[in-house]
Amino acid sequence: MVKVDDLTVRYDGRIAISKISVTFDDGKFHFVMGPNGGGKTTLVRAIVGFLPYEGKIEIDGVEHSKYLKKNSIGYLAQRGFQFFSFPMTAIEVVEMGRYRFKENISERRRSAMRFLKALEMDEFWNKRIDEMSGGQQQRVLMARALATESKILVLDEPLTGIDSKAQSLFYDMIERIKEKFQLTVIMTTHDVGFVSKYADDVLYINKEIVPHDKAEKVLSDAEIELLYGPKMEIADRHLTKNENV
């Protein structure tokens, strides 16, 4: 369980998120949604341990900094252009997630291959990541996050720039690995259309928490306006893996 209490984060004195209190229950798929600049990335980066904050975070009842001294949190950052000239193979990327384990080279490679196989990327183990498609890159990076053997997986808008069919396949994959590795998944996203199918819980923020009935996954018009402004319309159409492109 990840418990966030009265969390505030500032950049150069400016408040990015204010007094966020929320609990992310074990074994669930949690969506964090809101507009650009609303604080989604700030919240998850604070949970991972990348940002200073005011307030309190506990993980499994342990104070945040103490937890991070002994444990990792699997993290997949927003997709960018960092792999256009990144001369590492898939297996080498995943091995980076094994840094905290005392393994010899052969043990580390076997461990990395296990996680590549879980993401159905083992046949590409020796392919350079900068030669892969965006979807393949994200699977390799997911394998690296899993290789930390954390029970918490944080995904920060992992599907930016990936087509709708690949997005559906990605969500299905997350569902499988969540069950296989008994993970708690926290994911920031704009994909309102996928909420009803995949989310166990949804947190809506726009610098502060936007109140929402947890029993209702679909946003009301009033909640959409609070998050995105009065001119936002939601398109409820996504490809699934069984549809033709």
Image (tube, rainbow, N blue to C red):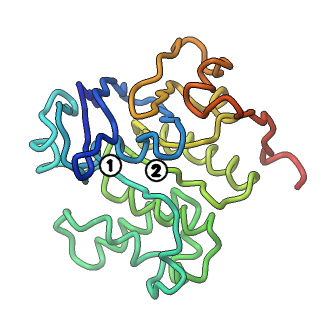
- Location of residue 196 by image quarter: top right
Find residue 75 and report its horizontal and vertical position in percent: 37, 54
Which residue type does callout 2 highlight?
A: Asp
Q: What residue is shown at x 21% (from left), y 76% (from top)?
A: 104
Q: What residue is shown at x 23% (from left), y 68% (from top)?
A: 99
Q: Is residue 205 left or right of residue 9?
A: right
Front residue (pair 172, 202): 202
Q: Quadrant of the C terminus?
A: bottom right
- Give residue 156's mark: 2
The secondary element bearing badge 1 is classed as: helix
Front residue (pair 75, 126): 75
Q: Is residue 9 left or right of residue 233?
A: left
Q: Give the alpha-carbon distance from disc 2 to disc 1, as whole Å.
A: 9 Å
The residue at which mark 1 appears reads as 45
Q: Are marks 2 and 1 in contact (CB under 8 Å)?
A: yes
The secondary element bearing badge 2 is classed as: strand
Q: What residue is shown at x 47% (from left), y 32% (from top)?
A: 30
Which residue type does callout 1 highlight?
A: Arg
Q: In this view, does 10 lie to the left or right of 206?
A: left
Q: What residue is shown at x 46% (from left), y 88% (from top)?
A: 87
Find residue 10 and report its horizontal and vertical position in percent: 25, 44
